[in-house]
Image (cartoon, rainbow, N blue to C red):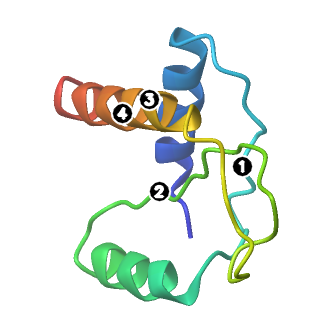
Amino acid sequence: MNDSDMIQLLLDTAASLKLTMRTPDPTASFSEDFSYLSEAVQAHGGKSLFFYTLTHTAAPGHNPDFDFDENALPIAVQMFCMLVYRLFHR
């Protein structure tokens, strides 16, 4: 589960980069891999955040025809790097 202050960091960071965001649901479930990792992090006092970089795809995930627009990658990297920077410079 996403932490509410991490969601706010995500929203603030996206706004600073002038990115369009859908407000994440703090109770939304994601992949079970993330769920296990998130629980372990939170059990030790940490905070977690899962977010998607949305782009058009040729087919849904876990499909042999899945393909995505690679132009989304620089945006995803910029978002991730800015989140890390802001997290460490609070």
- Nearer mark to the viewer, of 3 and 4: 3
Pointer 4: what residue?
83
- Identify residue for label 1: 24
Q: Who comes first in sequence, dot 3 or dot 2?
A: 2
Circle 2: residue type: Leu
Q: What residue type is labelled 3?
A: Pro
The answer to which of marks 1 and 3 sits earlier in the sequence is: 1
Residue type for callout 1: Pro
Quarter of the rendering occupied by the C terminus: top left
Q: Are marks 2 and 4 in contact (CB under 8 Å)?
A: yes
Q: SS for tag 1?
A: loop
Q: Which of the two labelled residues, at mark 1 and mark 2, occupies the earlier sequence position?
A: 1
Give, as a three-letter code, the residue at label 4: Leu
| Residue at image location 49% in from the left, 43% down from the top | 5
| Residue 16, numbered circle | none
According to the image, label 3 marks what residue? Answer: 74
The secondary structure type at the circle numbered 2 is loop
Could you give the CA–CA distance between mark 2 and mark 4, rounded to whole angstroms? 10 Å
Report the disc number at residue 49: 2
